[in-house]
Image (cartoon, rainbow, N blue to C red):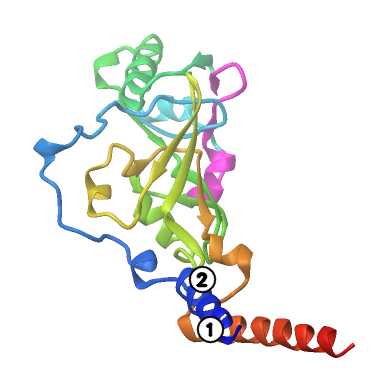
Amino acid sequence: MKKFFLYAAVLSLLSSCISTKQVTSFQGEPISKSEITKLNSEPYRLQVNDILYIDIKAENQELVTLFKNSAGGGGAGGLYYSGYTIDSHGNIRIPYIGEVNVLGYTEKETREKLEVELGKFLKNPETVFVTVKLGGINFIVTGEVGSPGTKNLAQNQVSIIDAIANSGEISTYGDRENVLIIRKSLDGVKKYKINMNEMAIFESENFYIQPNDIIYVAPLKQKSWGIGTTGLQAFTTVVSVLSFVVTSVLLVKNL
């Protein structure tokens, strides 16, 4: 009987504590690009609710100001008021030009389209210089991270490492081998699995996230067991449980 409880305690201890390997990111050696799928180089295509920063310059700058959104505010939050939001029909509204459909366009394609539209109002359309950029990259991080929530980074590209680092890192109970990217695109909703423990992540086609991605870090099974993260915590919990079982058995025998 004593041996049974001893074996049970050892097995529970070994299976319940979280190993160093489970919480160590970027394990292994870098993989040559020739051995993996090439990075996805397709440019991002604009979607509904994206916010654009648009700047217009031309020879006649006074005339150009008529086409600009005059709302104030800077930074990612200020762009909510001063930027150009893509509505549910895929349009942005430019003063005097009206609605311009940019749904599914890249930043470059949008810039070229606006240059053509603005050129209709100017004597020297070749002098028009338009800048189009996303108003930062919005994404949501949820699950086993230190600071879940909606994030916005004013960068042209945001990697999965940037996203996690700006969300308080993955907690001890987070499953680094099971990080999900949920992405809504023009083709529908897709789901991708990322293993943060492997060096191969740096060459993954999903290393760079896209605007409006949802990143979910699943919990390790040890969390649902509630046993502990370290060997000492797990041992203490297992001993307490087994002591309770032994005490219960002895009380039942003495009844």
Q: Nearer the viewer, mark 1 or mark 2?
A: 1
On screen, 224 above or below 150? below
Question: Residue 193, how many percent across, how many down?
Answer: 41, 42
Q: Amino acid at mark 1?
A: Lys
Say which residue label 1 marks. Answer: 3
Between discs 1 and 2, the one toward the N terminus: 1
Q: Which residue is painted at 27% across and 60% down in the image?
A: 26
Taking the view exactly as shown, the residue that stands out farthest to the top is 120
Would you call the spot at circle 1 few (<14 residues within 10 Å), some (14-19), or many (20 or more)? few
Whether residue 95 is visible:
no
In the rendered image, the quadrant that contains the N terminus is bottom right
Magenta segment: 71-94
Q: Amino acid at mark 2?
A: Ser
Indicate yes or no whether the magenta region holds residue 196: no
Say which residue label 2 marks. Answer: 16
Horizontal arrangement in the rendering, residue 104 relative to residue 28 (left or right): right
Question: Residue 175, how many percent across, how many down?
Answer: 46, 58
Q: Which residue is painted at 52% across and 36% down in the image?
A: 83
Q: Are marks 1 and 2 in contact (CB under 8 Å)?
A: no
Q: Which residue is painted at 62% across and 21% down in the image?
A: 88
Helix, strand or loop status at disc 2: helix
On screen, 106 above or below 234? above
Question: Residue 44, how many percent across, how many down?
Answer: 37, 29
Would you call the spot at circle 2 few (<14 residues within 10 Å), some (14-19), or many (20 or more)? many
Helix, strand or loop status at disc 1: helix
State the separation of the CA atoms marked 1 and 2: 20 Å
